[in-house]
Image: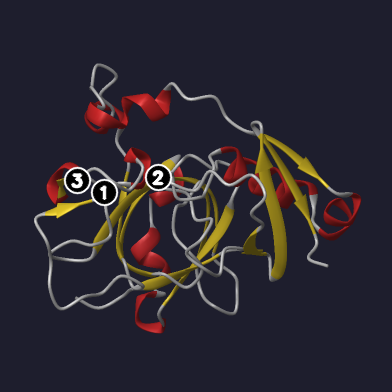
Amino acid sequence: MHPIAHIHNDLTTKFGVARQSGLVPHLQSRIIFEPEYRNPDAFRGLEGFSHIWLIWDFSQAHSQTWHPTVRPPRLGGNQRMGVFATRSPFRPNNIGLSSVRLTKIEFSTSDGPVLFVEGADLMNLTPIYDIKPYLPYTDSHPEATSGFAQDFLESTPLIVDFSDEIRALLSPIQLQALRETLEADPRPQYHEDSSRTYHIIYANYDLSFQIQDGRVSVFLPK
C-alpha cells in the first residue's frame, strides 16, 4: 500500500496525541493529498458526509516483530492484554483506524482538494492510506460494550489552567484543543509524581505542564 495523503496539525510529536479519535474534538487538521490523488472527481459527493473514516499508518511505531500481548496505557502500563483486544500501535500490521468530523473541503488550493477535519488522533504528517465515509446507520452501535476501557469513560477530566503567556501565544480554538488534550491526561498512567514537569510540543511551541490534585498548570519553560 502507498499513502494517498498526509495529515497536518499542531501535534508534531507522539506525546500529547489523543489516545482515541474524538477525545479532542476541537483539534483541527488538514488532509493534503499526494499529487496523483488530487483529481476533484475523487471527492464528488464527499461533502454530504459529516464524518469520515481514516485508515492510516502508525509511522512512528514500525517494528520487525510483534507480540501477542501489549500493555495498554489506561491499565497503568503494568497489565497485559491481547493485542487484538487493544488499539495499540504495536501490531502485526501498523494500521490505524479513526473516525473524524469533516468540516469542509476546499478545492481551489495550491495543494488541490484539501479536507478539513476535527478530532483526529494522528500526529502531524502521519501517512493516510484511505478515506471512507462514516455511515451512522451501520457504523454506530449505541448498545456496544467497552470492555476494560469502560473505566476511562467514567473518569473525571482534569482541570486545566493556562498561564497568561500561553493565552497570548495561542488562538482560542488552539487553546480549546490543548485544553481537551490535557484534560484526558497524556501522561503514562504509572506517572504520579506531582513535582514532575512534562513538556508537550504544540503549535510549534515547547510548553511545560505539571499536574497536582486533579489540576493541570500549563506554562512556558523557564
Which amino acid type corresponds to the residue marked 3 in the rendered image?
Arg
Name the residue that disc number 1 marks. 87
Q: Earlier in the sequence, mark 3 or mark 1?
A: 3
Q: Is residue 146 left or right of residue 203?
A: left
**What percent of the width, then of the height, locates residue 67?**
11, 61
Q: Earlier in the sequence, mark 2 or mark 3?
A: 2
Q: Work out which quarter of the rendered image holds the N terminus and state it.
A: bottom left
Q: Earlier in the sequence, mark 1 or mark 2?
A: 2
State the image quarter where residue 36 is shown: bottom left
Q: Is residue 148 left or right of residue 216?
A: left
Name the residue that disc number 3 marks. 80
Front position in the image: 41 or 188: 188
Name the residue that disc number 2 marks. 20
Dot 2 lies on which element? Answer: loop
How many neighbours does mark 3 have within 10 angstroms: few (below 14), some (14-19), or many (20 or more)? Answer: few
Tell how many labels.
3
Look at 15% across and 51% down and name the residue there.
83
Q: Residue furthest bottom?
A: 35
Look at 53% across and 39% down and name the residue there.
184
Front position in the image: 171 or 129: 171
State the image quarter where residue 48 is shown: top left
Cα distance, mark 3 to mark 1? 13 Å
